[in-house]
Amino acid sequence: MNKLLPTALITTLMLTLAACSGEAPEQSQASNPPDSMSASKKSMPEDPDLKSLYTQSCFSCHGTGAGGAPRTGTSEWDSRMAKGMDTLIDNTINGYNGMPPLGMCMDCGEEEFEALILFMAGQQ
Ligand code: HEC
């Protein structure tokens, strides 16, 4: 009889703890950078075709800034856009320092590159 009470208490405690930790993932999602970013700028193209090209290629570097890639939806694109779209498309096709030729998108043509660049620069 004496042993039963502590067990019940511990069980209640553990259930309370479990309930608390159940809320934790929700909280960390709220402070997720891509989520808060999408509040002001889009982090994914709305067009489904463009979105799949973007997620399969550009996103791996431009979504994270890997290797110094200008990040999608940030002002890091301002100095790039200043070069003019023709230069940017040329550099995308031929490669540019850490930027691999075609941005690893073998199915992309100039039109797709232009749309992807405009999207990443937050201009579409
Ligand atoms: C493997 C990583 C990687 C992928 C994938 C990638 N990029 Fe890049 N990109 C970079 C890096 C790194 C830079 C910065 C290069 C520098 O300025 O030295 C860059 C720069 C650029 C620039 C600016 C070029 C300039 O003249 O300043 C454009 C435009 C660009 N990327 C477009 C794209 C597009 C469009 C895609 C998808 C089709 C893509 N990138 C995919 C890494 C990547």
Image (tube, grey):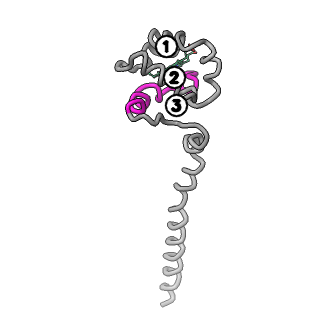
Q: CA distance from mark 2 to mark 1?
A: 8 Å
Location of residue 101 with respect to 119 vertically, above or below: above
- Amino acid on which the number 1 mark rests in the picture: Ile
- What residue is shown with label 3? 63
Q: CA distance from mark 3 to mark 2?
A: 12 Å
CB of mark 2 near ligand 1 (< 8 Å): yes
Q: Nearer the viewer, mark 3 or mark 2?
A: 2
Q: Over which residues does the magenta segment extend? A: 49-70
82, 69: nearer the viewer:
82
- On the rendered structure, is 91 left or right of 107? right
Q: Which residue of the protein is positioned furthest toward the left in this rendering?
A: 107
CB of mark 1 near ligand 1 (< 8 Å): yes
- Amino acid on which the number 2 mark rests in the picture: Ile
Q: Which residue of the protein is positioned furthest toward the bottom in this rendering?
A: 1
Which residue sits at x=50%, y=26%? 61
Residue 55: say if magenta.
yes
- What residue is shown with label 1? 89
- What residue is shown with label 2? 117
x, y percentage for residue 23? 53, 61
Occupied quadrant, residue 105: top left
